[in-house]
């Protein structure tokens, strides 16, 4: 996001001389509200990795285990909020880029519904792309601070007066619900990539604590996740990577390992005609309708799911976005909270039954075979809480109640 009088490069070498004359809208609103800016944090080349590597600053480290990734693309924001180096940070999310850093680095992050927070005045390869919009949101160590940031930014900042693409929707005050009044659908497996032992344990322990607090738990097998994953990845690259190639080729910088991977999402360099992009949007809207009908007809308040199929990965070893990107194509507000579970190599091992498992895809095999218990010691497990579109306030309020049940206080780390 553009900061007045400072370099804004977005992880691109070609932008190292880009000194912006004005703040972007979000930075201007935060400045008007009295925010103290003191550090700009790292992000990956292209902004399309759930990791942090670029040719300017290199990699960010995970605050719980320096051998692991802090996540991405809001890489440094996850790390700095996780270890208490900032009170509140701001990131962006088009496929998991707020939620992955929060989950990996032990903090809390909100992916709001689209068109509530401004991204005007930021470096992006996705300008004009509205099929799967990038959103801006906060990363913190408490859900109360997420609520504070959203309330102040929206109700006092009035971003719709500065950005004509936003909707006029004030932030509502929603009371923290009684856990016994909640119905939560739990995704244990998205049908694409099996979760690793620490994530499985965190889900099990979280569900049992919620049940004990009176929450009604519903097991949920999410429909059409393969279609959702294939569609959203085509949306990411449907301009044939034209904007990415322009930004990268302007300097001739070398491509990182995960940039090569991400540029081949969807159908890579194929430029989709408008007629095919419309078909993708039609599929997207059908998915949104299907999930909305499930939530409404079954009187489900929220969905609880893994934020990733593993804990924080090694840098340049995160390939799967399916658990996060599902909620981007659905445009559901999603909050990452910490389960309070940390990877334990003595406990979080593949079982004999796990070792007999037949992989459903090369992607699943790649991700699962990257998990070796002794290489992820102490990594936190974050989980996602999702609600209906534009029910952001309800998601945040429920997040407070769930954190109370779990007894997780990130200020005591």
Image (spheres, rainbow, N blue to C red):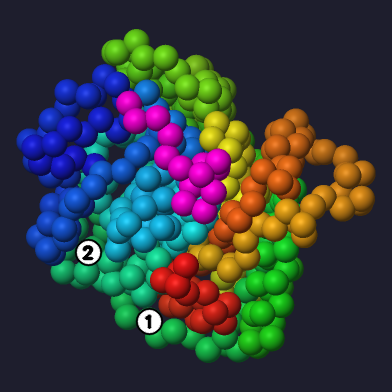
| Residue that badge 2 annotates | 153
Q: Position of residue 405 (x, y in %)?
A: 57, 82
Dot 2, how many residues are within 10 Å of its Cα: few (below 14), some (14-19), or many (20+)? many
For residue 221, say whether it is visible.
no
Is residue 355 in view?
yes
Taking the magenta stretch, the answer to whether it contains residue 8 is no
Q: Residue at x 60, y 89 (%)?
A: 180
Q: Position of residue 48 (x, y in %)?
A: 45, 34
Vertical order, 331 against 214 (above or below)? above
- The part of the image, by quadrant, that contains residue 170 is bottom left
Q: Nearer the viewer, mark 2 or mark 1?
A: 2
Residue drawn where x is 72% and y is 63% of the image? 201
- The CA span between labels 2 and 1 is 17 Å
Q: Is residue 311 above or below residue 277?
A: below
Residue underneath mark 1: 174
Front-most of residues 194 and 233: 194
Nearest the camera: 315 or 273?
A: 315
- Total label count? 2
């Amino acid at each position: 996001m553009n900061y007045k009088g400072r370099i804004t490069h977005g992880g691109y070498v070609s932008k190292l001389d880009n000194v912006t004359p004005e703040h972007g809208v979000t930075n201007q609103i935060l400045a008007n509200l009295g925010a103290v800016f003191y550090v700009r944090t790292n992000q990956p080349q292209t902004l399309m990795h759930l990791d942090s590597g670029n040719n300017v600053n290199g990699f960010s480290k995970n605050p719980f285990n320096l051998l692991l990734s802090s996540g991405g693309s809001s890489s440094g924001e996850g790390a700095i909020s996780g270890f208490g180096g900032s009170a509140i940070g701001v990131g962006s999310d088009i496929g998991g880029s707020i939620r992955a850093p929060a989950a990996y680095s032990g903090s809390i992050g909100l992916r709001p519904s689209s068109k509530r927070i401004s991204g005007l005045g930021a470096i992006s390869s996705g300008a004009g792309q509205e099929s799967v919009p990038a959103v801006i949101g906060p990363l913190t160590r408490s859900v109360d601070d997420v609520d504070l940031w959203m309330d102040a930014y929206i109700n006092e900042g009035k971003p719709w007066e500065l950005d004509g693409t936003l909707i006029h929707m004030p932030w509502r005050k929603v009371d923290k619900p009684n856990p016994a009044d909640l119905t939560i659908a739990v995704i244990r497996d998205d049908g694409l990539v099996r979760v690793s032992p620490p994530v499985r344990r965190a889900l099990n322990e979280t569900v049992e604590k919620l049940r004990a607090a009176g929450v009604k738990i519903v097991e949920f097998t999410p429909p059409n996740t393969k279609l959702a994953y294939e569609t959203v990845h085509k949306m990411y690259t449907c301009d044939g990577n034209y904007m990415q190639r322009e930004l990268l080729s302007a300097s001739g910088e070398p491509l990182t390992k995960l940039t090569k991977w991400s540029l081949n999402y969807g159908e890579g360099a194929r430029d989709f005609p408008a007629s095919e992009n419309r078909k993708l949007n039609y599929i997207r809207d059908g998915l949104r309708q299907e999930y909305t009908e499930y939530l409404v007809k079954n009187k489900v308040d929220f969905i609880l799911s893994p934020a990733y199929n593993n804990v924080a990965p090694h840098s340049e070893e995160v390939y799967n976005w399916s658990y996060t990107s599902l909620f981007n194509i659905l445009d559901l507000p999603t909050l990452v909270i910490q389960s309070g579970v940390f990877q334990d190599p003595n406990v979080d091992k593949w079982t004999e039954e796990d070792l007999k498992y037949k992989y459903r895809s090369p992607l699943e095999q790649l991700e699962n075979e990257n998990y070796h218990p002794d290489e992820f010691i102490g990594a936190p497990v974050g989980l996602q809480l999702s609600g209906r579109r534009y029910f952001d306030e309800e998601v945040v309020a429920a997040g407070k109640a769930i954190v109370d049940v779990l007894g997780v206080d990130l200020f005591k780390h």
